[in-house]
Image (cartoon, rainbow, N blue to C red):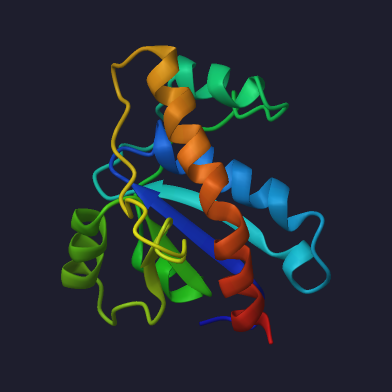
Amino acid sequence: MSASGEILVVCTANICRSPMAAALLQHALLVEDEPLKSWKVVSAGVVARRGDAVSANSVAALKKVGIDISGHRSQPVTQEMMDQAKAVLCMTESHRAMLLVQADPAPRHVHLFREFIPGDAEREIGDPFGGPLSLYEAVRDEMVESIPSLVKYLRGLAA
């Protein structure tokens, strides 16, 4: 793990969930104290192609909360990204399993984006790909709900 702060957010193709989650988390970290305020949040996909545009509904769902991700381009997860990350945040257990099998060495802090929510909330974030804007908005809201508990966890990593 590097001394600088970098958080890696992972989904399947890096065109829907992880770009949205990364942008929402980056936005939340901007109001934190240092060092979290300076941490960079990046996203990638376990089977992503390099250079694909983010889905239009992902852009629209975040535009409604004042965040522009229209310039995002997909990228595959690399070992270097995992090695540099303070934490790797996945959308589903299958993403986590793929990373842990493929990585050498495996990242130390691999979690689900919603893992730290207290109670019995659903931990995985489903794939909205191909669905209506309302599904993307529901996914966005699941991510937003996750942010306070996730930031609390990241504060612990920064200490």
Q: How many numbered marks does the figure carry?
A: 0
Residues 17 and 65: in front is 65
Residue lying at the far bottom in this picture: please name it: 159
Q: Position of residue 57 (x, y in %)?
A: 46, 17
In the rendered structure, the answer to whether residue 31 lies left or right of residue 17 reads right
Residues 149 and 69: in front is 149
Residue under the image location 29 percent in, 34 percent down: 127
Residues 152 and 100: in front is 152
On screen, residue 144 above or below 147: above
Q: Position of residue 32 (x, y in %)?
A: 79, 63
Residue lying at the far top in this picture: please name it: 132
On screen, residue 4 above or below 116: below
Q: Position of residue 113 (x, y in %)?
A: 43, 56
Residue under the image location 34 percent in, 50 percent down: 91
Residue under the image location 46 percent in, 66 percent down: 116
In the rendered structure, the answer to whether residue 41 lies left or right of residue 107 reads right
In the rendered structure, the answer to whether residue 25 lies left or right of residue 75 reads right
Residue under the image location 16 percent in, 70 percent down: 101
Screen quadrant of the C terminus: bottom right
Q: Quadrant of residue 157?
A: bottom right
Residue 19: in sight, yes or no?
no
Q: Quadrant of residue 4?
A: bottom right
Residue 138: in sight, yes or no?
yes
Q: Position of residue 66 (x, y in %)?
A: 73, 26
On screen, residue 18 above or below 105: above
